[in-house]
Image: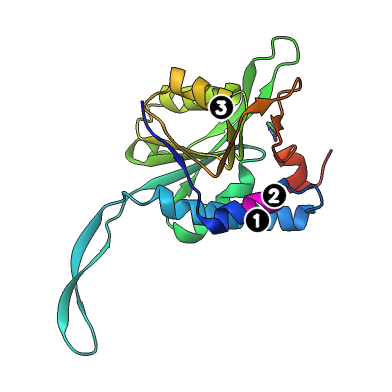
Amino acid sequence: MKKVHLIEHPLIVHKLTMLRDKHTQSKDFREIVREMSLLMAYEVTKDFPLKEIEIETPLATTRQKVMSEKNVVIVPILRAGLGMVDGFLSIMPNAKTGHIGLYRDPKTHLPVEYYKKLPMDVLDREVILVDPMLATGVSIVAALNKLKEAGCKDIKLVVILACTEGLEAIHKVHPDVEIYCAGIDEVLNENKYIVPGLGDAGDRLFGTK
Ligand code: URA
């Protein structure tokens, strides 16, 4: 089973508290999600390979390290995952973006795919699946199933807030997927919202109800 990376940097902890606060309005909520995603991208890219190149400083020719081209695709789960894309792209401007849209069937309660678009070369890329909330894990497990059906092997999952039940659900079905999060809450309420949580991430990002 892959490790869960709980990112406890003070900047991230501070920003998560601001997200949790119900008085934080959409504009600030969006900005904080973007900033947290950017900061989390540092942790996610920690194992990315470096290679040596030759450069000239104003004083000498020298061999120094740069990141070797690791091809990445950011895949947000629609719609709340969209809030995390810009933060990742701001430090990985050459990454491509795929999209997976899922809704929950009101009768079966099972996730149904309504949209999927991945880059043609997705199999040559590391996938970073993003969604702010890992609650029951049902839709994230479904998104991971879709990615694996498409042939993706190298997948990381980045969420802002997870709960224990969701983490266990992912581990059970996708033990190979490394998970990054900024907080872990214990409880889901009867509507499957994380408690204390931060509410409905999609509604708070986009100002809907
Ligand atoms: N999705 C959300 O947006 N919030 C939760 O608490 C759980 C799932």
The mark closer to the camera, 1 or 3, is: 3
Which residue is at 25% across, 57% downward?
50
Please state if 186 lies on the left or on the right of 126 as rendered: right
Residue displayed at 63% across by 19% down: 111
Q: Amino acid at mark 2?
A: Leu
Q: Residue at x 42, y 23 (%)?
A: 174
Q: Are marks 3 and 2 in contact (CB under 8 Å)?
A: no
**Distance of mark 1 from mark 3, alpha carbons?**
24 Å
Residue 192 - label: none
- Percent position (x, y) of residue 187? 66, 27
Residue span colored magenta: 15-19
- For the residues labelled 1 and 2, say whether their Cβ atoms are less than 8 Å apart: yes
Quadrant where the N terminus lies? top left
Residue located 76% across and 45% down the image: 204
Note whether 202 is above or below 86 in the view shown: above
Q: Along the polypeptide, which appears first: circle 1 or circle 3?
A: 1
Q: Mark 1 or mark 2: which comes first in sequence?
A: 2
Q: Nearer the viewer, residue 98 or 172?
A: 172
Near-viewer residue (109 or 39):
39
Please, what secondary structure does the residue beneath circle 1 have?
helix
Please name the amino acid that badge 1 sits on: Ile
Residue corresponding to mark 3: 164
According to the picture, the residue beneath numbered tag 2 turns out to be: 19
Residue density around tag 2, few if under 14, some if 14–19, many if 20 or more, within 10 Å: many
The local secondary structure at tag 3 comes to: helix
Would you name the residue on which mark 1 appears? 32
Tag 1: Cα neighbours inside 10 Å, few (<14), some, or many (≥20)?
Answer: many
Determine which quarter of the picture holds residue 63. bottom left
Q: Is residue 18 magenta?
A: yes
Three-letter code, disc 3 = Thr
Estimate the x, y position of residue 164 in percent, counting from the top left.
56, 27
